Image (tube, rainbow, N blue to C red):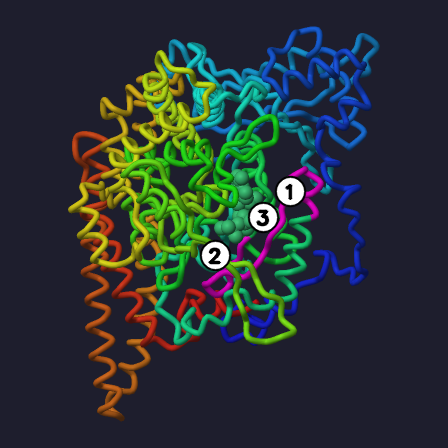
């Protein structure tokens, strides 16, 4: 289609059909009925499994009891029947390789029988173990050719689900992915191991507090996911979006997000239709999504589920991203999950809300009305603060990607410096703790709105701080630096293990305080806890910050406090295999040194490859699309110079811009071809030299975009992409 075609931009708005198929009938949604209907969860198991088998499955799911082969056989049979009833012909072990996305290889249930026909078969062995080979995934040295086997292992604690396609369906079974030597090749195994580590230390602490009921502590996670939604006709005309997920070109439009007229605005009809469809599908998959709204940037939105245990939440997060992207196509839309698809407007992140809960139903980060005398809460809360202070580097690594580097520190997302925001009430209590036991809590009181018929609103005792990377928000911590297209498994693995260590340290201190004393005496326990808290809070205090994290003053102060400022992915990755981190992850059986080193290598390589691909794409678009358009325009101008001095001036200016672009392209080609001896050095070269060269090309091209006639410009502009809905 020619850009002069009047349908070029109108199509976006007019092609859309509600329900994605043109039917205008309102589809009723019975949430209770459809929720989880595409999952093989406990309800489904209960109705299909013999009672004893069901009880054993339940023990596996709820208490991590190992599973026997005879149980697996019965479960497999029931699961197969259920899947076939839901239209499935195939099954897949669904896993999370170190690329950060999900992977699957499908096998059909079909097995030929002797009579020339076939039967559907699926055994306990098929369910429990797979060997997908999958040897092309990055292994970071863990899979040398002589030990290249890779196995998937069923994770019964995350429900199997059905994936539908218009022409059929398949059964997806969440699995872990390990090498022949038993080392983790995925993000699920370390996450599960870290949950175990935290469980152990948290139980130990609870027992010191006299808790005899709790049998298990698990971490809970709820992720707020930001994303962009753009019309597919623009998407397919932007090779940069198609290849790299972000725009590598694009002049700033006259209007961006300055007016704040998109944020929390009424959701456009087509977008809302899409959201309703996404949510319905997620309900069916048992993903409890709850909240939706417009975000800050034009065409940016957010979706958030209700929290679940970390392992299931991480699987559901992946499903959520896949569903967001999949359903968009039905509406002529494309969902962009990149951290920074557009320069000059906000990028996308993923707030990771995190807490710890007991199997008896208590949230260990629930402060209650008088947090100052809630010793157990303060103990767990202080453990998180201590953990963040001790391992700022690991938290930073857990969100380190080339894409996320565009956000962190760009005054729209928290800076790369880790700090903890506690809110006024808790900060006040922590202040008291440095001197001894806390004796009072500030209270929020009520808000009087000055209008008689409006209710008095209870006021929270602490305000929110949107600029902090790690904030206490009422009864959970919110880690806000996670990138929008990242798996949340890594960040949560880090959170779990660092808090496990902090609880271990504090538990040991508490045991020492209580040695030879009667811990069942409440006063004795309180005095001992106060002493531990005093030591910990004095030690970890530099990490607590309640001000504006976006300011230069904070950067200077953070440096004075000795906090780390790991600005780019590569700075962060440099710390990953430090002795402290190797020791921590080995001590709590989360990652051994080889596993850690493999992750380091893969992350450096992914960084290198990402920038390298962006640079090649920049070069190709600049040479084959931008430059020819500019030259065509110069030709038109040249034909008219003799009639107008203005045209001559414009031609000279455009000619100069073309020269600038040519020079920048040549420099980029040279830089992008250049190679050093090691992967690390090549990655550094990308950051230090290729990124600036790419920016120079973009800058020259964006100048031309402002000069070249719209009908000659080959790329959809920001104005079109971001504002046609
Ligand atoms: P806020 O407005 O403070 O961001 P919301 O209630 O909107 O809080 O919650 C944001 C996210 O935090 C949701 O996904 C929610 O389920 C999650 N969340 C709430 N409580 C917890 C918890 N105890 N553990 C983990 N996540 C939680
Ligand atoms: Mg929030």
Mark identifier at residue 288: 1
Mark identifier at residue 333: none
Q: Find residue 56 and report its image quarter.
A: top right
| Quarter of the figure that contains the N terminus | bottom right
- Magenta span covers which residues? 280-302
Label 1 secondary element = loop
Q: Which residue is mark 3?
A: 324
Query: Mark 1 against mark 2, which lies toward the viewer?
Result: 2
Earlier residue among tags 1 and 2: 1
Label 3 secondary element = helix
Q: Nearer the viewer, residue 487 or 552?
A: 552
Q: Which residue is mark 2?
A: 444
Label 2 secondary element = loop
Tell me what residue is drawn at x 79 percent, y 17 percent.
Answer: 49
Tell me what residue is drawn at x 61 percent, y 27 percent.
Answer: 360
Q: Position of residue 99 (x, y in %)?
A: 43, 33
């Amino acid at each position: 289609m020619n850009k002069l075609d009047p349908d070029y931009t109108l199509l976006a708005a007019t092609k859309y059909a509600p329900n994605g198929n043109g039917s205008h009938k309102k589809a009723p949604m019975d949430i209770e009925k459809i929720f989880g209907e595409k999952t093989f969860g406990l309800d489904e198991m209960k109705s299909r499994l013999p009672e004893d088998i069901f009880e054993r499955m339940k023990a596996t799911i709820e208490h991590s009891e190992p599973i026997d082969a005879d149980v697996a056989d019965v479960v497999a049979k029931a699961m197969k029947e259920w899947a076939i009833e839901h239209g499935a012909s195939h099954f897949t072990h669904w896993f999370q390789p170190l690329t950060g996305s999900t992977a699957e290889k499908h096998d059909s249930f079909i097995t030929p029988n002797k009579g020339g026909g076939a039967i559907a078969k699926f055994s306990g062995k098929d369910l429990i173990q797979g060997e997908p080979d999958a040897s092309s995934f990055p292994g970071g040295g863990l899979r040398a050719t002589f030990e290249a086997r890779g196995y998937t292992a069923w994770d019964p604690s995350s429900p199997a689900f059905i994936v539908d396609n218009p022409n059929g369906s398949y059964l997806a079974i969440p699995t872990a992915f390990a090498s022949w030597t038993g080392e983790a090749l995925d993000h699920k195994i370390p996450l599960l191991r870290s949950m175990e580590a935290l469980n152990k230390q948290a139980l130990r602490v609870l027992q010191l507090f006299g808790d005899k009921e709790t049998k298990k502590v698990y971490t809970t996670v709820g992720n707020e996911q930001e994303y962009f939604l753009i019309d597919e006709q623009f998407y397919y005309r932007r090779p940069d979006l198609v290849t790299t997920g972000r725009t590598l070109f694009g002049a700033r439009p006259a209007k961006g997000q300055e007016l704040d007229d998109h944020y929390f605005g009424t959701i456009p009809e087509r977008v809302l239709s899409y959201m309703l469809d996404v949510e319905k599908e997620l309900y069916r998959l048992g993903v409890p999504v709850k909240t939706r709204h417009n975000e800050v940037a034009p065409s940016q939105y957010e979706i958030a589920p209700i929290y679940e245990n970390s392992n299931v939440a991480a699987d559901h997060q992946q499903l959520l991203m896949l569903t967001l992207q999949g359903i968009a196509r039905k509406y002529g839309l494309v969902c962009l999950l990149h951290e920074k698809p557009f320069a000059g407007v906000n990028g996308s992140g993923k707030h990771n809300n995190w807490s710890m809960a007991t199997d008896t139903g208590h949230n260990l980060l629930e402060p209650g009305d008088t947090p100052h005398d809630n010793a157990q809460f303060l103990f767990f809360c202080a453990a998180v603060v201590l953990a963040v202070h001790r391992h700022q580097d690991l938290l930073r690594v857990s969100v380190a990607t080339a894409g996320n580097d565009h956000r962190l520190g760009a005054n729209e997302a928290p800076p790369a410096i880790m700090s903890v925001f506690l809110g006024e009430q808790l900060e006040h209590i922590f202040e008291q703790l440095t001197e001894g036991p806390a004796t009072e809590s500030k209270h929020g009181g009520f808000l009087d709105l000055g209008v008689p018929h409006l209710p008095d609103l209870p006021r929270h005792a602490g305000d929110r701080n949107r600029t902090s990377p790690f904030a206490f928000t009422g009864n959970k911590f919110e880690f806000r630096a996670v990138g929008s297209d990242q798996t949340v498994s890594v960040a949560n693995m880090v959170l779990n293990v660092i808090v496990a260590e902090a609880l271990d340290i504090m538990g040991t201190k508490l045991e020492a305080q209580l040695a030879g004393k009667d811990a069942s005496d409440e006063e004795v326990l309180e005095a001992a806890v106060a002493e531990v808290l005093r030591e910990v809070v004095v030690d970890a205090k530099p990490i607590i910050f309640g001000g504006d994290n976006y300011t230069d003053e904070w950067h200077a102060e953070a440096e004075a406090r000795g906090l780390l400022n790991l600005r780019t992915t590569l700075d962060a990755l440099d710390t990953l295999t430090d002795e402290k981190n190797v020791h921590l992850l080995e001590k709590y059986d989360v990652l051994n040194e080889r596993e850690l080193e493999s992750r380091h290598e893969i992350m450096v390589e992914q960084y290198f490859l990402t920038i390298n691909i962006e640079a090649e794409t920049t070069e190709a678009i600049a040479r084959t699309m931008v430059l020819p358009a500019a030259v065509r325009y110069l030709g038109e101008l040249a034909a008219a110079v003799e009639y107008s001095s203005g045209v001559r001036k414009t031609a000279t200016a455009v000619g100069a811009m073309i020269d600038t672009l040519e020079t920048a392209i040549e420099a980029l080609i040279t830089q992008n071809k250049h190679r050093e001896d090691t992967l690390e050095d090549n990655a550094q070269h990308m950051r230090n030299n290729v990124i600036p060269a790419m920016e120079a090309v973009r800058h020259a091209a964006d100048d031309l975009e402002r000069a070249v006639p719209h009908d000659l410009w080959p790329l959809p502009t920001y104005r079109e992409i971001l504002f046609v809905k």
